[in-house]
Amino acid sequence: MFMLRGGLIVSDYDDLVREINGCEKCELSRDRQNAVPGEGSLDAEIMFIGEGPGRYEDRDGRPFVGPAGHLLDEMLAAIGLKRHDVYIANMLKCRPPRNRDPLPSELDSCTPYLDRQIEIISPSVIVCLGRFSFSNFFPNETISKARGRPRRWRDIVVFPMYHPAAALHNPKLKPAIQKDFESLPGLIERVKQAAAKAQVPDPPDPAKQLSMFD
Ligand code: URA
């Protein structure tokens, strides 16, 4: 964890991290070296959500510190961001054996932790890295069709992208991930402008201001 916000938020967050680190709700807790709660700024406007820890994350207790994490860092740097500017979490907080896909029962056990992270951090934009993260918000859609197009989920803009590990396995996907990353600063700006306009008394038509994400 890097930067903290005052008061209740910090203690809620600390409680949550403690719970995750002690969690035994599913079998994944048995073989972990470390749970991986997540890290970054609690004031972050952007929250990245991946799938689950791999070998290096399990070793260090930190998200995205292996090869996929290096690519994530590289792409963040390309748009002028560092890890401490954003918040990074995963669907699962413990590593599945041999990095297999998360089981529905594991996702069910772990998602309440993610829900609390989203509530505490309250990001304007959630970037879903890969299909498991995207399905948490839009269960019946495919990432390949949805990627690169922002949409609304509650009062948050969700932006689906391929998982960086997908680009490591299939380099043909890298340009798509790079393009999606490059569109992030513009998206954040548009979200900020829409929020600022929504605060002006008597906006002409607030529904229209949100419609750009439909
Ligand atoms: N892949 C993920 O989805 N999350 C990590 O933390 C690392 C690799």
Image (cartoon, helix red, strand yellow):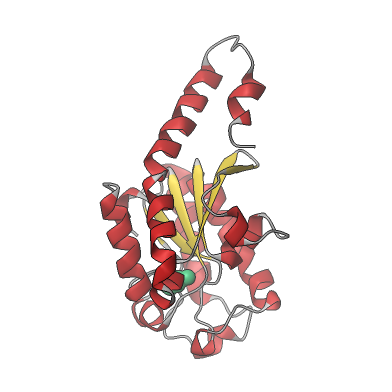
In the rendered view of the protein, which quadrant contains the C terminus? top right
Residue sitting at x 54%, y 83%: 96
Q: Quadrant of residue 61?
A: bottom left
Q: Position of residue 110 (x, y in %)?
A: 61, 69
Q: Residue at x 37, y 47 (%)?
A: 182
Q: Residue furthest right?
A: 140
For the point 53% across and 89% down, the residue is 97
Q: Quadrant of the N terminus?
A: bottom left
62 left or right of 127?
A: left
- What is the quadrant of residue 204 in the picture? top right
Q: Nearer the viewer, residue 184 or 195?
A: 184
Q: Quadrant of residue 172?
A: bottom left
Q: How many marks?
A: 0
Q: Position of residue 195 (x, y in %)?
A: 51, 27
Q: Nearer the viewer, residue 111 or 174?
A: 174
| Residue 170, position as x, y percentages in the image | 43, 74
In the depicted view, which residue is nearer to us: 40 or 136? Answer: 136
Is 198 placed above or below 112 here?
A: above
For the question of whether residue 2 can be seen, the reply is: no
* Picture coordinates of residue 134, whole percent (x, y): 60, 59
Q: Residue at x 55, y 72 (%)?
A: 92
